Image: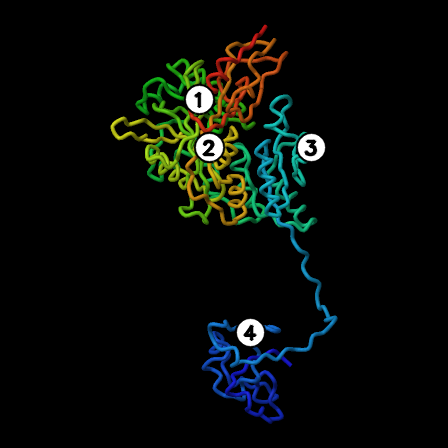
Amino acid sequence: PEAVLVSRAVIDVPPPSLPNESRLGCADSVGTEPSVDLTAAHEALIGEGFRNPANVIKQPTLATLGETPFDSDGDDIEHHRVIATEIVKDPFQFESPEPVLQNAIVLLDPKIPDCNYLVTSARKRGLMVVGVVRGSNREGSASALYPTAEALLEVGMHQVYEPPVGAKFDVVECAANLKTIESQQNLRFLGVVPCREAAVDFSDILGALLGLAVVNDLGLASARRDKGLMKVAVANAGLRVARYARLTAGNGEDVASAVEELELEYPVVVKTPRGMSTLDVFICDNEEEAKVATSKIVRSVGPDGRKTQYALLEEFIGGEEFAVNLIASPTTPRGVQVTDIWMYHKIQANGAMINTYQEMLDPHDRAYASLVRYAEGVARAVGVKYGVAHCEIKAKYDTKSGRWVDPVMIEIAGRLPGGRKSILAEICVPGWHPFEAMVDAHCGFPVRMPPSFRPTKKAVHCYVPSDRAGVLKSIEGEDFDRLKTHYDHLLLAEVGKPIKRATDLTSFAAQVWLVGDDAEEVKCDVMRARDEFKVEVE
């Protein structure tokens, strides 16, 4: 017997008595065609196609035991009957079921404390977390930025992959190892999350090698890392970029011709094409300084550990610098959307633009509307479709309109912003959880968006420099928790070790994060943190 549905109008019709007719509607035992076209009745199960009452009783349906496929507000229930098959206690199993797969996610080059939030977000979604550490870890105070495998396991990661001792990271070998783990442990990787700038291009390539569909545009992977190719992609999208040239001469002899061809005036910017944390970025006031800067970059080992074949010479863009952070997912209203904006307060000294502090702004303020539109266009131009992005822009303030205008990209990366910006954004924007959103976006899950990205608190990232260079003898004013709006701090200077004047993000003596309801109080604490910090060197 089979589960069937039958119209009440034919319940009392006696079944046909043809001896050679089968239960499946065949006319005889030799297998002639059914007298009813089942496809015509598919939509309603019992429809116009069942005109012969003798065939109605013989057709199997989609009904299940004790249920009806018809809604109560549709066909009347009493017009159908359900005949259930006998329940067998121990049914015969013809084949073994497939093992249940455990969903997993890969964190590429994780760092603490961002890693803690990503692990917590992944665990909430029932994901197994596998960390991939590409290179050797640094010792000392930077251990949080370059944690060991043991440290990552302690913060909650399930497994950590490292390249063999003495070997460089190979993305193909890494993918092969992860596929082996996936097979042996019945895992299913859903996404690869880059946790620092040097991992941006590797993450999408690794995701593709793992067979994932949720990866950013592979054809533009280099444009999300190489600042020269980045400008090409953005310019091709019709967006303004700084004029630039590639310098390949190790002695800087091509500086003069590049400056003349681009019709630039000094100062100019000379930088490494694959840098990070403002490393190997020089503001040059004349040709000689540009040549020296070029010679330091060309054919040297860059900040990411790769040999650099050329340097970039760019026009110096005036105005103020901003960082615009975005979330990208096909499940968001615009595909790419700005979540928070930070204004960089810098001073020019020692041949570089040096950070003093960075403050969080309101992305819904009309004064920053051009920055929002421009950053979203840049993200689309370099193929960011999944995850987060961090776009650095320069713009000028128009006093007449009260808006920031003429935005120009410095760089963009498909990663979390540095300096714990996402942690502060989660504190200041109600309903916004950037780490959960990042995990969801890279796994292809719908991203939960807040009603508004307007911050309700003032957040500032303060950089505390050393005004002297030498071996650190003593420190004064390092108790930053005395500040009323203190949230957290990181003391990078250690007594008895060398300290230098700050030029890039890695050379500051300390970093302080401040959060408060009163913007003036927060800025007052910024000044105190910088002015009251004193060092003695020998």
Q: Amino acid at mark 2?
A: Asp
Callout 4: SS: loop
Q: Is residue 146 left or right of residue 273?
A: right
Task: Name the one closer to the observer, 109 or 526.
Answer: 526
Q: Is residue 35 left or right of residue 237?
A: right
Q: Position of residue 134 (x, y in %)?
A: 61, 33
Callout 1: SS: helix
Labelled disc at residue 445? none
The residue wearing badge 4 is: 68
Alpha carbon separation for disc pair 2 and 3: 32 Å
The residue wearing badge 2 is: 226
Labelled disc at residue 150? 3
Q: Amino acid at mark 4?
A: Thr
Alpha carbon separation for disc pair 1 and 4: 67 Å
Alpha carbon separation for disc pair 3 and 1: 38 Å
Of mark 2 and mark 3, the one earlier in the sequence is 3
